[in-house]
Structure formats: C-alpha cells, structure tokens
Image (cartoon, rainbow, N blue to C red):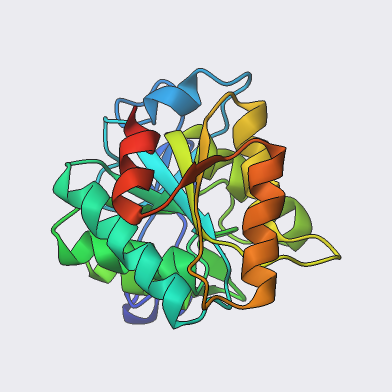
Amino acid sequence: RPTAREALGLIPFFPSMPRGDMGYGVRLIDAESPEYPRLLRLLPNPPRLYVLGRELPREPAVAVAGARDADSIGLSLAREVGRLLAKRGVPVATGLSRGVDEAALDGALSAGGVTVGVPPSLYVDGRLRREVRRLVGMGGAAVSERLEASDIRRALAERNWITVGMARSLIVAYARYRQSGWGTLIAARAAWRLGRPVVIIRPPDSAPKDAVLGFETLAKLGALVAETPEEAVERALA
C-alpha cells in the first residue's frame, strides 16, 4: 500500500510490476492492453504508456493544439472547439500545456466530454504534475511514455507523437509564430507524417500579428482552413 504522502502524489509509489497498477492509480499498458489507443497501436513499435485517471477512450480522439501564451481570443476558440467535440461525443486529446491545450480540455469537460492529456511525464521532481492532478481530478485521463523526464526535449517530442498518434486529426485552434521554432508547428508536422489531417482556424482581424503569421504559415504548409470552430470540427471529423 502507498503511504499517505504517496497517495497524495507528493512522492511516487511504483511497485516493481511489469504491467498493471503502478500505485496511486498509475497503470502501465502496452499495445496488447484492451484500453490501448487503437490508432496508436498501428504505429511501428507502439510504446508502453503510463496512464493515470479514467480508462482511455476506445474511439479515436481529435487532438487540439495551439499557443501556450494564447490571449483571450485564442482561449475562447479553444474552449469552443473542445465543447463542440464533446457535444459530438468525440474524445479530446491535447499535450496538457497551459493556454490552448488547457482551454480545449476545459471546454470539453464543461460539456461532459472525454479528455486525454499527454504531458511529457506524469511526475516532475518526484511529485505528480499540477496539470495532471487537475485533469484527473476533473475526470480526465493523463498518459505519457515517462514517469519522470530527464531529457525534456525528447519527452516533448514523444508527447507530440502520442497526442496525434491516438487522434484521427489535429485542430490548431490558435497558433503564434516563433522564428526559433514553436511547438504547434512541431505537432502539425508530426500529424502530417502520420497521415492525419490538420485543420487551423482563421484568427479574427483583431488578432495580433504573430497569430496571423502562425495561421498563414500552417495554411501554406497544407493545413485545412476553417473560419469558425464549428467548421473546424466538421472538417476534423470529415
């Protein structure tokens, strides 16, 4: 049994078990597990996954990505995308970052939807990640290849593959261009490499320049353009 501190997620409790319950509700699953995401199972060498929270959905999700520093425009678009997907009974998957990711999950949860967050690891410095604790506490699931991440760059790259790998498509609710590279672009490229369509919502005229440039960049690379969250959801499910 875990101690009180372990049960609260303050320190990890991981019995030496190859599969199944890993303590504090964390379980280790592989491609043979019934709850393993169906689309992710089709990838070469599908990874083992640590899961916390509700059982992973059997139906393929739609992934949602976007700027971590989204303004009120981007957050509103992301929440509406999450809400609309939930109303259609479609699971929502994100990288569990702040900003667009968090807003999309909040929108889905507000409509009673199924949510999956994919952080770079479940724990950091021996403690359950705040965002993982929050999502699981609200009825969602968190999934990652790693319990702890010593190489954060590699863990972030793995997160993108898992997020889009379990999804039928990717909706970019709101992107902000960065010259030095940006996570939304990396996620979109991962989706394209896996043959998943990418849909991006056109930002309103009042959006800042970097949001417009982020939209234009992804549209030129082949993202399907949607004028509204409703259209984005329709195109993502087509």
Residue at image coords 34%, 78%? 8
Residue 189 to residue 213: above or below: above
Left or right, 111 with reference to 207: left
Where does the image place residue 182, in percent across and percent down from the top left? Answer: 73, 61
Where does the image place residue 12, in percent across and percent down from the top left? Answer: 48, 68
In the rendered image, the quadrant that contains the N terminus is: bottom left
Residue at image coords 70%, 42%? 220
Residue 57 to residue 42: above or below: below
Q: Which of 36 and 172 is in front in this view?
A: 172
Q: Quarter-wise, where is residue 209 in the image? A: bottom right
Left or right, 127 with reference to 151: left
In the rendered image, the quadrant that contains the C terminus is: top left
Residue at image coords 48%, 68%? 204
Q: Quarter-wise, where is residue 162 in the image? A: top right
Left or right, 105 with reference to 95: left
Camera sees residue 139: no
Q: Nearer the viewer, residue 92 or 57?
A: 92
Camera sees residue 196: yes
Residue 174 to residue 146: above or below: below
